[in-house]
Image (spheres, grey):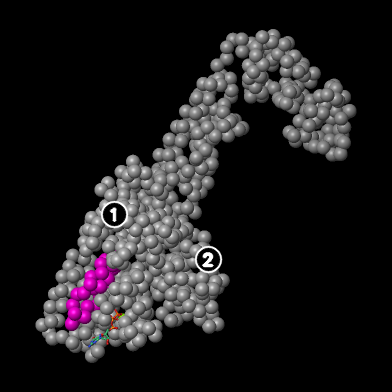
Amino acid sequence: MKSIIVGTAGHIDHGKTALVRALTGVDADRLPEEKRRGITIDLGFAELDLGDVRVGFIDVPGHERFVKNMLAGAHGIDLVALVIAADEGVMPQTREHFDICRLLGVSHGLVVITKTDMVDEELLLLVRAEAEELVAGSTLSGAPILSVSARTGEGVEELKAALRETALKVPPRSSEQVARLPVDRAFTMRGFGAVVTGTLVAGSVAEGDEMELLPAGLRVRVRGLQVHGQKVERALAGQRTAINLGGIDVQQIERGLVLAPAGRLLPTQALDVQVDVLESAPRPLRSRSRVRVHLGAAEVLARVRVLEDSGEIAQGKMGFAQLRLESPVVALPFERFIIRSYSPQVTIAGGRILDAHAARHRGREMEQTRSRLETLATGDRVDEFAVFVEMAGERAVRRAEIAARTGWTDEVLEDAVRRAKEAERVVEAEGVYVAKSVFDRLANDALEEIAAHHKREPLERGISRETLRERRFTHAAPEIFRALLSHLESVGALVSDKEFVRAASHTLSLTPSDVMLRSGLEKVYREAALEAPTFEEAVARAGGAHHSREHTRKILQLLIDDRSLVRVSPDLFFHRAALDSLIASLREYAAEHEPERMIDVSTFKEIAGISRKYAIPLLEYFDRERITRRAGDKRIIL
Ligand SMILES: Nc1nc2c(ncn2[C@@H]2O[C@H](COP(=O)(O)OP(=O)(O)OP(=O)(O)O)[C@@H](O)[C@H]2O)c(=O)[nH]1
Ligand SMILES: [Mg+2]
């Protein structure tokens, strides 16, 4: 069965509460003060079963001073019943409430002319004409206009039929976002504890769900749920829902908090928005003005920064702005909000959020900022995802950030990622996303940096990854840096060798005397075999004593790089061939001493034909290389 939320709207005393009562039998004015003063002060609730449609009514106060309360309910409605008393016609709050509904994007509704018993036919026609004029040009133009008397009951049945028909036209709520319930009421129920109520604006909530109240970040557990006064296991988007919460005291809960899945969304204090300024606003919306922002059931103070060159958005016009909030809220793209002036408190504008976690924009980047916002305002999900990724630049964004920023469910997020990757707009690395354009630029930077390094150090085999990262990529996400190098390696632009990388095209440029020194050193170590000389001695024997130590070290490094020599300890080098034959002898010895395969230092010295000075560093080297393993004062040959 379809569930629909209908909100009343209209001037004070025009018969909204009486109408809800005529329809449902429920007096939505609950507070003693409301009864005493005969006016509605806070939101009231009632239900109506229309066969295949279940209507949840939110009855709002018409009094100018309680528009704030009206807004706490109006954000969640699917359909508005705009009430106009036949004896008074269109009045200030008729217009203000209607403006609010329009700005909140409530596109379905009907007009109800009440108190028809108090006027004659002629006046009724006049009010009807006035109503038509009010809604002309809006999404409610052409909506049904009904005449009702709550006193005599005349027209009530026709109204029910019209409500049902209109309700059936309301499209179902999107299921793209995770559950959110802006709290409009919190109370304690004896034996149950804290209960919150509100309209579940997205997703679904089930018994046992772990949730949190934002922006406070209070963790709670769903103990039980009611929809339309009936216990249910799961509540769905679009339903008026009462939730019994565990793990919290009712004093901690206030109107405006949002119930959402635990750990999924994040509070924010800066919103990039598209604003629609009312024709009736007393002045344009200007930068630096202090305003009241009504979002969900919350109200927060904010400073406006208009993102248009003129610094203002004129009456009747639309434009981009940033709202800097004085306290945090939880907000998501495409949520609607209302702006009221700080004082006097009147509705002046409304709009849609485009980026709920906005960055500060620099003046000279205004053009780019606007074009990004334009994309967010008009683009699809992939555009939205790509824009958020692009904005992060080389810092890149993590999956959890995107989830918090969009409110998307896992499936929707997955789909956006897949399509953005297919379209080559985004690159993914270990759950981190970076714009393709940024990735390409970084790849280019890496190649440039490596080329520069080769130029400076022609005798080095490359640059260490860490040095490269420190030179150019300290701001980049480490995941992206790693992905970058493996990408460059996979396309053959780069060769990586342990912790070093070099350009695939890099070749050593050796002078003839370097070449001679290199082969000379190689020969010295080969012939010395296990009688390895000191490095200075080796250089002298190779006839390279006239080179600087720094230079001869570089040549030595080349021999290590091409695996001719092995560094056994910081200043002790052996030729690989000598080590290989020593290893072979060790293994032979082990085979003759199965199953122990044990050797001690003196046997080792004998086999190798070396003194203790070399035996210890060599054995330690073999331990590190897993050729031997220490066992007491002996070693096992592995
Ligand atoms: N004669 C007549 N009186 C009505 C009708 N509907 C409401 N009234 C009276 O009008 C007065 C205001 O009605 P409410 O329903 O409280 O008006 P409201 O729009 O809810 O007022 P607020 O919530 O304070 O904005 C009450 O005294 C009602 O009895 C009607 O159809 N005919
Ligand atoms: Mg009322």
514 is higher (above) or lower (below) than 313: above
The residue drawn where x is 69% and y is 15% is: 521
Mark 1 or mark 2, whichever is nearer to me? 1
Residue 193 location in percent, x, y?
53, 78
Q: Is mark 2 within 8 Å of ligand 2?
A: no
The residue that label 2 is drawn on is 218
Report the span colored magenta: 80-107
Q: Is residue 628 above or below residue 366?
A: above
Which kind of residue does numbered mark 2 sit on?
Answer: Leu
Q: Is residue 631 left or right of residue 504?
A: right
> Nearest the camera: 17 or 61?
61
| Disc 1, SS | strand
Residue 163, horizontal then vertical, whole percent: 27, 78
Taking the spot 34% from the left edge, 60% from the top edge, the residue there is: 291
- Inspect the image, locate mark 1, and give the three-letter code of the amino acid beneath it: Arg
Camera sees residue 122: yes
Which residue is rendered at x = 21% and y = 85% of the image? 115
Name the image quarter holding residue 514. Answer: top right
Numbered circles on residues, count: 2
Residue 276 against residue 563 in the figure, above or below:
below
| In the rendered image, the vertical position of residue 19 relative to residue 446, given as above or below | below
Q: Is residue 559 magenta?
A: no
Q: Quadrant of residue 165?
A: bottom left
Residue 359: image location, x then y, percent: 41, 49
Q: Is residue 303 left or right of residue 309?
A: right
Task: Point out which mark residue 286 bears.
Answer: 1
* Quadrant in which the C terminus appears: top right
The secondary structure type at the circle numbered 2 is: strand
Q: Residue 370 vs residue 139: left or right?
A: right
Instruction: Give the alpha-carbon distance from disc 1 to disc 2, as whole Å.
Output: 36 Å
Res. 378 in view: no
